[in-house]
Image (tube, rainbow, N blue to C red):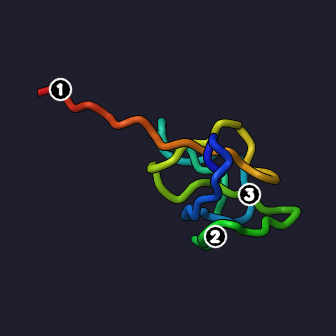
Amino acid sequence: MTSDMEPVQISVRVGLAVETVGQAGRPKTITGFQTQTSPVLVGAKERAELGNREYITLGSVLEGCVLVEKAPEEKVEV
């Protein structure tokens, strides 16, 4: 749901929970993920993360209903 409580369909990756691994600045908390469109069901030993950077979450945990908002446009200065 967006911050104005409108449901949106977002690409979500759901996979097995692992300790944080990956390159510096690009941490991964899941492995063996499948990309699905919201709404999704997350099992007891699974985690979810947003599949793209179009939206950002307003909370730190993807559980229950998650509030999201459009990500701010990045300005590229030349």
Q: Which residue is mark 3?
A: 47
| Mark 1: few/some/many CA within 10 Å (<14, 14-19, 20+) | few
Seen in the picture, residue 63 relative to 59 is either above or below; the reply is below
* 54 relative position to 75: left or right: right
Q: Secondary structure beneath disc 1? A: loop
* 17 relative position to 54: left or right: right
Task: Please give the name of the residue rendered at 48% of the width and 36% of the height, measured from the top-left corner.
Answer: 25
Out of 2 and 35, give the one closest to the viewer: 2
Please tell me which of labels 1 and 3 falls first in the chain.
3
Measure the C-alpha gap from mark 2 to mark 3. 11 Å
Q: Position of residue 17 (x, y in %)?
A: 75, 57
Seen in the picture, residue 28 relative to 43 is either above or below; the reply is above
Among all residues in the image, which is located at the extreme left?
78
Amino acid on which disc 1 is placed: Glu
Q: Secondary structure beneath disc 3? A: strand
Out of 30 and 39, give the one closest to the viewer: 39
Q: Position of residue 53 (x, y in %)?
A: 46, 49
Task: Please give the name of the residue rendered at 72% of the width and 68% of the height, measured from the top-left corner.
Answer: 40
Amino acid on which disc 2 is placed: Gly
* 45 relative position to 51: left or right: right
| Disc marking residue 13 | none
Q: Quarter of the image containing the C terminus?
A: top left
Tell me the mark number nearer the camera, choosing from 1 and 2: 1
Out of 8 and 61, give the one closest to the viewer: 8
Q: Quadrant of residue 37?
A: bottom right
Please tell me which of labels 1 and 2 falls first in the chain.
2
Q: Which residue is mark 1?
A: 77
| Disc marking residue 32 | 2
